[in-house]
Image: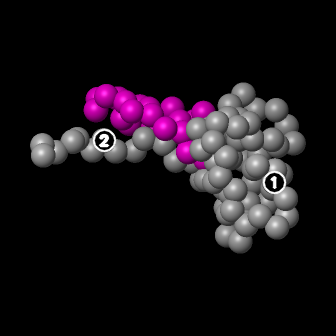
Amino acid sequence: MKYNEKIQKYLPWDRTVLTDRTVAHNRPDITLTLKKKKTTYLVDVAVPAPANVKMKYNEKIQKYLPLSQDIRNTWQQEAEIHGSRKWYPLSPS
């Protein structure tokens, strides 16, 4: 899908996010850009063990922080990072 000015929502997955400078981690699992809200959501999916949820969440935030800052500067949009925050155990059927 090619990005152009008429598209109001853009949802690529596993694609490189281009900004003005090079960052080490610029390929989140999902990137949702909402032009009207001027917001981009960076989503990196993980399925950690219950004991590692907090560590994995912090790791994802630190990993994509430089990219979110570049998105703010380059695209003049808010950038939110989303990763594994909580663990929801499966309930028995």
- Secondary structure at numbered mark 1: loop
Left or right: residue 61 versus residue 21 is left
Crowd band around label 2 with a 10 angstrom C-alpha radius: few (<14), some (14–19), many (20+): some
Q: Is the magenta stretch mostly helix, strand or loop?
A: helix
The answer to which of 44 and 80 lies nearer the viewer is 44
- Secondary structure at numbered mark 2: loop
- The residue that disc 2 covers is 87
Residue 62 highlighted magenta (yes or no)? yes
> What residue appears at the point 38 percent right and 36 percent down from the top-left corner?
54
Q: Considering only order in the chain, which callout, 2 or 1, is on the residue closer to the N terminus?
A: 1
Left or right: residue 54 versus residue 74 is left
- The residue that disc 1 covers is 3
Q: Do the residues labelled 1 and 2 touch (CB within 8 Å)?
A: no
> What residue appears at the point 85 percent right and 37 percent down from the top-left corner?
21
Q: Where is residue 11 in the image (x, y as percent from the top left)?
A: 65, 52
The three-letter amino acid code for the residue at tag 1 is: Tyr
Question: In this view of the protein, can residue 73 be seen by the observer?
Answer: no
Give the farthest residue toward the bottom: 36
Question: In this view of the protein, can residue 1 be seen by the observer?
Answer: yes
Q: Looking at the rendering, which quadrant does residue 87 occupy?
A: top left
Which region is colored magenta? 42-63
